[in-house]
Amino acid sequence: MIFSSIAVFLLPRLAPGDPALAIAGGDATEEAIAEIRETLGLDRSLVEQYWVWITGVFRGDFGDSYLYRLPVSELISGRFQSTIELAVSATIFLIIFGVGMGVLGGTTRSRKVKSVLDVVVSFLLSTPPFLIGIVLIILLGVVWQVLPISGEVNFIDDPATGFKYLLLPSFALSLSSSAVVARLIQTQMISVRGEDFVDLAKAKGVPPSRIAFRHVLRNSLGASIVAVGLQVGHLLSGTIIIESLFARNGLGSLTINAVLTRDYLVLQAVVLFAIAIAIAIQLISEILLAALDPRVRLGSE
Amino acid sequence: MKSRAASRYLQAFKTPVGLISTLSIVALTSLAFLAPVIFPNGYDQQSANSLLGPSLKNPLGTDDLGRDIFTRVVYGLRSDLTLVYIAVPISLVIGTFLGLIGMISNFLGNLSMRLMDFIIGFPALILAISITVVLGTGFTALLVSIIILGTPGVARLARSTMLEQEQREYVIAARVLGISKWKILFRHILPNIMDPLIAQGAILVVVAIFIESGMSIIGLGLQPPAPSLGVLLNNSMRFIIEYPTFVIGPVVALVSLTLAFGKLADALNATVVRK
Amino acid sequence: MFRRVTSTTRLIRVLLAAVMTVSGLMAVQTPARADEALVVAGPSDPQLGSLFAFRAGNYPWIWGVFEPLIKIDEKGKVQPNVASRWTLSSNKLTMTLFLKRGITFHNGKKLTAEDVKYSIEQAALATNGSQLGFIARSFASVDAVTDGKLVINFGAPTSNIFDLLSIMPIMPKNSYPETKLGKTVIGSGPFTWESWTPGAQVVIKKYPKYRDAARINLSQITVRIITNASAQLTALKSGAIDLAFGLSTVDAYALRNDANYKLIYAGGAIVPLGLDTSKAPFNNIKVRQAVGYAIDKNRINKQVFSDTGLETSLFWAPRESGYPKALQDAYTYNPTKAKALIAEAGAAGAEFDLQTLNLPANAALVEIVANNLRDIGLKPNVRVLDVTAWDAKQVAGDIANAFIPYHGQYGLNAATLLNSLATLRVEKGTTKFATAEYVKLRNAVAAAATSGAKEKALNNLSKFMVEQAFAMPIVMAPSMFVHSKKLTGVEFGELGHTFWNSAKLG
């Protein structure tokens, strides 16, 4: 974490230009830029700037955006809702599609359905979310104009329209992850199906649908929860490009903009935030895995 | 040993999936590298006829500067494959080196793993964007981004395979016999980790293409005038409503490329690695 | 195989049908908005630290909250605003401004000459980043004589004074530090600053005590921040907004014949090709002129700007007084002549860097320019830099052998442009062109006191610049704004700022 904080502090500062330029613009004079640099404290030494920043972070103060002169925390919380809307709806679709396709693949006897599913899943697996997004834009936004392809409407202000704007980006974001989940559930279900207690149930004359749902699915659920958890991490990192593609004004676009305008403090905060979330997701899924599977004990590595 | 390995790979290529994906890769690669022969006039033949629909002369239409889109897609494929065929082997070599270095020195091994953890922990796209801004957009920045983002996966794979092989009897026996660490590494361990690494290489290709096209979508891809599939994709998205046919070429090329390499990885994993 | 495909398509159809049903259920009309509450789309967040500079994020709201001293109308004529009238001494060195009576700021305080003086001082501060700050810095003195009377003593005749006065917001004395931090944003305009949610929206509300309040129709303006051009288009078409501030040229132009929308041109950008005259191959005047003839401006205008731009060889707007119309087409596309000039200079095959910044128009334009230059036997290496990296080089006055900047200052006075554009500057200018002759001709334009003198000076300078060919405009690209037919009475300032005083939703 400390390494990351140093890296994210130094990396953007290696790039040509600084926030003073983004403020004054390219037609400004060098003297004006130098003065702005001074008022922003950018003329101080890197060690000093880092110290000021990192001690602030420990107090919960991430500093002010150079460009907007607003507290970074305020900027981030302003964009947070948009990204959370996207991530939550994508997670819901991830669960619906992933578990749906996985269970279908794990239970169906029909070869036709299986092979269609196989084609769909492997197509989704090797296609990045933004490419799926573009295909969706072409199909549902251009050829058949049923859904808006760019922009957003605040979900809380206007849930119906907000949801409409959310559909395409969250489909795009969730589909390839849901293929991973589907494949995992399918293999898990097939292997559970081969275990003794299933044979026993069959011998006892339990109907096949009951076997599938009561016995097989239940015993495959642990793996799928962990798989979903891991994929949620992927979803979050995928939001940057998806937001850019669908013109959503969330944390992703804030981040890209911060890099391009060298708004160092915003970028630093976003990266720390992203790392913290990644660690949290990893911890949660490890704990879940431990709770679900008695064979895995915490700290028994 | 060699003939056995060859026959195992042959087996992978004999499965329908392996065969189709290999053939597609060969076809796409030869198309890309024969581009200057097929289209000797190059990719920058501008004209006043911009944004035309598909026709016999321009099977995919023309772009905003009046260039033939089909030609540009083929040259774009060439840029992507050039990038990938340079970046992926480099990641494989560096990753393998960093993964296996633990065998020579425990300290270096741990150090390199910490470094890999650090890269993995860092948000990938932000890292790529920052690298690009530091180095300036273009081929080098993409190359460095792909190598840095691709290496940790290889290193972890190499290390875990190495740790597993180290417990094998033949390695322990070789050690007891006093054979040098380097010799064990090259004679025994390296050949055994080649298979999973080659499969990982195919996956890395997909990742590299993701990075190239993803960076282009946010406007940080290759420099003009050379097109890449991502640059074409980004460009065509600007005209998505008025001229939706523009986007078809780059999308089809990208999907077939990633599908072919993704499926090849599957086929290799299924037949070669498992054995 | 065939069966497989059909079942896949069937599956896709089922999926699509499901999506259709869901979206059909969702197809609720956008809710009706409160009467006379306008929603527009702005291209980026406000930049309160740059109120004196040109920032597109401030354009939609700044003249709602603040007011300038004077306005320049579409024809380039100066109109009174906060200043009711002004006089210029016969030696052109002293300007006296008389302020309208009864103007109050939103905090209730009276607007006085002291506040105007403070605002001029703020515009002069380098840290406030005004592109026109050099005009304010050139003043010998500014005196608030009475509450309603202000006297400016120029150091030298300042013909571009109105450029500054028309873009400078008047704010209460000592208020700017607070405004920069977004704590209080106080002006004297018809609307008060209500709220700003970064990344989402700015809301301004009608100021009930505005001197002309009875004639202000809108009760509230919400500026929704939509950075992406195609998202603005979607929002406009769905009726969520009534005015788009940041559409792409292609999209805006596509709406020109749509009866539901109105397309407005205001302000715009100067997109020139600059050449570094200190290095080969462009230290040779013949090569520079060849470049002028090599560029296919017509195709650039068509393919990059949907034929909305002005193909010109001059930096000035045609409405500029004394505009040398005869020189407008000094350089037209003539590759044969260009090749001959290159051969004469012996520069065939010369290799050099051609750089531009990463804006959609420039990135497309540079490809055409590079193609044109290759056609005449030069070898440009193209690089597109990210905007901040570009700005760093431009400010340092050293970009590359050849470069294509983007100056969003189309329509400003020639005397202003000569100082505010890095491409034309003498000190740290990016073309490094600073001969004594050039300096002399520039100064003559700035010092021209009568319209006759101005015409002569501008003609001489333009002729010289065309001949020397160190910086050649390619296209003047207008900014395009599209609003719904429901909205009427919006006034656009010369740079694309909006005045809402007479705007109405019908």
Image (cartoon, coloured by chain):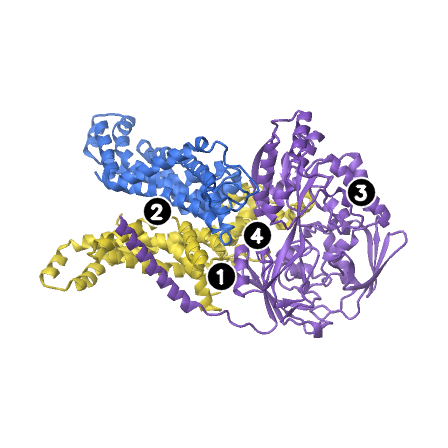
Q: Compare marks 1 and 2 and give the one earlier in the sequence.
A: 2
Instruction: Look at discs 2 and 4 and give the one toward the viewer.
Output: 4
As drawn, C51 above or below A3: below
Q: Which residue is mark 3?
A: C459
Q: Which residue is mark 1?
A: A152
Q: CA distance from mark 2 to mark 4?
A: 34 Å
- Residue A276 visible, this angle: no
Q: Which chain is purple?
A: C
Q: Which chain is blue?
A: B
Q: Which residue is mark 2?
A: A126
Q: CA distance from mark 1 to mark 2?
A: 28 Å
Q: Residues within 10 Å of mark 2 (few under 14, many from 20)?
A: many
Name the element at disc 2.
Answer: loop
Dot 3 amino acid type: Asn
Instruction: Look at discs 3 and 2 and give the one toward the viewer.
Output: 3
Mark count: 4
Q: Nearer the viewer, residue C297 or C462?
A: C297
Q: CA distance from mark 4 to mark 1?
A: 22 Å
Dot 4 amino acid type: Val
Q: Which residue is mark 4?
A: C250
